[in-house]
Every structure is written in structure tokens, then in C-alpha cells.
Image (tube, grey):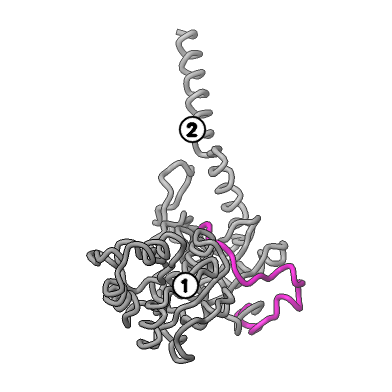
Amino acid sequence: MTVRKFPKKVTVREIVSYFHLTQITGNDDSLNRWVVVPDVNRPGFELAGFYKMTEPRRVVIIGNKEIGFINEMMSEQEQRERFLKITDAFTPMIIVTRNLAIPPILKEVAQSENFPIFSSPLESYQLIVDLITYLDEKLAPEDVISGVLMSVYGKGVLITGESGMGKSEVALELIRDHQVLIADDRVDVQRVHNTIFGYVPELLKGFLEIRGIGIIDVQKMFGASCVDDRYKVDCVIELVKYSSDGNYERIGDTETKTTSILGVEIPTIVLPVSEGRSMGVIVESAVTNLRLIEGGYSSGSEFKKRFREVQSKQIAEDKEKE
């Protein structure tokens, strides 16, 4: 699988639009500042004059406690000095929650620095949760993988393999059996928390390339229910060319192989491809077996248990005959 990194950023303008914030200070240019860290800062330590280990690129949230501390505990000189620190070029924005009144000196310093301050009616905890969730998704690491992403029996299956292994043909078999196509050829993947999501570029949505036929429109041929644009990646199925010398899984009780995607280990099944094998049916069987394993049932372990029982019974019968 080949992977390409993308730099991620969100502008203050996008956040303002999404959360319907009211702008208090800063002009239109100030909305072009970047947010690159999916976290926020409640600046209690900074207001107290402690700046060690501070991540200055976080969105600053000011609520009841901060306003109370500013009004009751900070002199005018301290306010001017410390507000200059939290309205520097690295800090993207300040949001004051519950539509609280902005401290006059903070407003004055921000206006002199053309720094954007906004007001929100939300409680601090609610804004923090919503904003971090929003930034987590917007700033989530992204890569591009060559393969086919399908939803098979509700599992997101990323089919990979060398060019010419028949990945798209397998996808066509699965679609004919009412499984769902997410992306063919190029799969954009994104890590949100510890989950990998795959999605299709707008240009490729609903299209499948079949050698000898060309591009086919899956939605037109099989219906809208056979396509989707985003899905969680639950497992990887790697197609490899069959070799008589290959060491393939025979019983199915060995340790599960994994593929690392953006640092997340995804369960991986290696399937050999040879003439006469219906790979669509095999992929469906592999997914069904994976679901059974996740439910606590292993066919391989059950087979070995049954084998031991038969072997023990045979030994006991042999002893009786002696």
C-alpha cells in the first residue's frame, strides 16, 4: 500500500461559520489564522503568569472562572502583560463562553494586535467538547491507499494487492451479491481517535473500473443502495498470487496478522488468488468467519478440540482391545 501525507489545518473563519460565533475584535483578515492543534486551552496558569509547557497554538477558551480571576485577582498591569502573551501570533483565537462580557483591557489589547476574540452562548464544557470533536475530525491524519473499500455484511473491508490481482472484479462480485462499494482504486483514509475511516474522492464516487469493459456506474447498474461514500475500515484483505510453495492459513487458529494504517493495527487476512476460485464468495466467508471470531467462536479452535476428542477416544478404544 502506498501512502501520501496531507498537511491539515482549519481556519478561524471555518470555526466561526460552523459554531455561529459573534466576532468582538479583529478584522476580516484575522479570520485567516490557522488552527493546527485539535485541542483547547483554559488559560488559568497563563493568566497567573506561568507559561512553561504551554502549547501556544491551541484555541483559548475563557469562561466564568477565568473572567472571575481576571476581574478580582489581576492588576491592570498584569492584565496588559499577560493578555499580550495569549494574543500573540501563535494563538489562533479566543472564545468567551456564555456571552460573558469581555474584560475591557483584553478587548483593548486584542484590538491593538488585530487579534480575533469571539463570543458564544454555549457553556464552557459544551463548547470544549463540540470544538475538540470538530477539530479532531477536521485535523485527523489522512493518507491515500491503493485498493478497494467495500462494506461486506456491515464490515468495512479494504481489499489490497498488486495491480492485476482482480480487486475490482472481486468488488463487482460482491456488489452483485448486494454488498456496498465505497471506493475503487483510490481510498482516502482518515484516523479519528483510534478508528480508521475510508472514503471516496468525489470524482470517483460510484464508479468501478473493470478491465476489458472500462468504467461502470455502479449506482445506475445496481441501485443507490450499492454505493456509499464513507465507512469504517474493520479489516484488510490482501490478495496475493497463488503459489504451491506459499505458506497459507490452513486451520485458522494462529495469531491474527495486522496492517498498520496511520498507526492503527487493522486485522488482515491474506487470500491466494488462482483460476477457478470465486473470490467474492471467499471474501464473504472470510468476513463471516471474522465476525464469528469477534463473537468468541473460532472454527479452527473448535476443529482442534474435536480432533483431540476423537484422538483420545481412539486411544481409549485401542487400550481396551489390548
252 over 219 or under it: above or below: above
Mark 1 falls on what kind of element? strand
Residue 272 seen from this side: no
Q: Give the residue pinned by disc 1.
A: 95
Residue drawn where x is 39% and y is 83% of the image? 108
Q: Residues within 10 Å of mark 2 (few under 14, many from 20)?
A: few
Taking the image as shown, residue 220 lies to the left or right of residue 298, namely right
In magenta segment, residue 284:
no
Q: Give amino acid for label 1.
A: Ile
Q: Position of residue 84 (x, y in %)?
A: 30, 78
Taking the image as shown, residue 51 lies to the left or right of residue 236, namely left
Taking the image as shown, residue 60 lies to the left or right of residue 317, namely left
- For residue 304, the mark is 2
Residue drawn where x is 48% and y is 32% of the image? 304
Q: Position of residue 106 (x, y in %)?
A: 38, 77
- Whole-number angstrom distance, CA of label 2 to CA of label 1: 62 Å
Rendered-image quadrant of the C terminus = top left
Q: Earlier in the sequence, mark 2 or mark 1?
A: 1
Q: Nearer the viewer, residue 60 or 103?
A: 103
159 over 13 or under it: above or below: above
Look at the image and give the residue range highlighted in magenta: 208-235
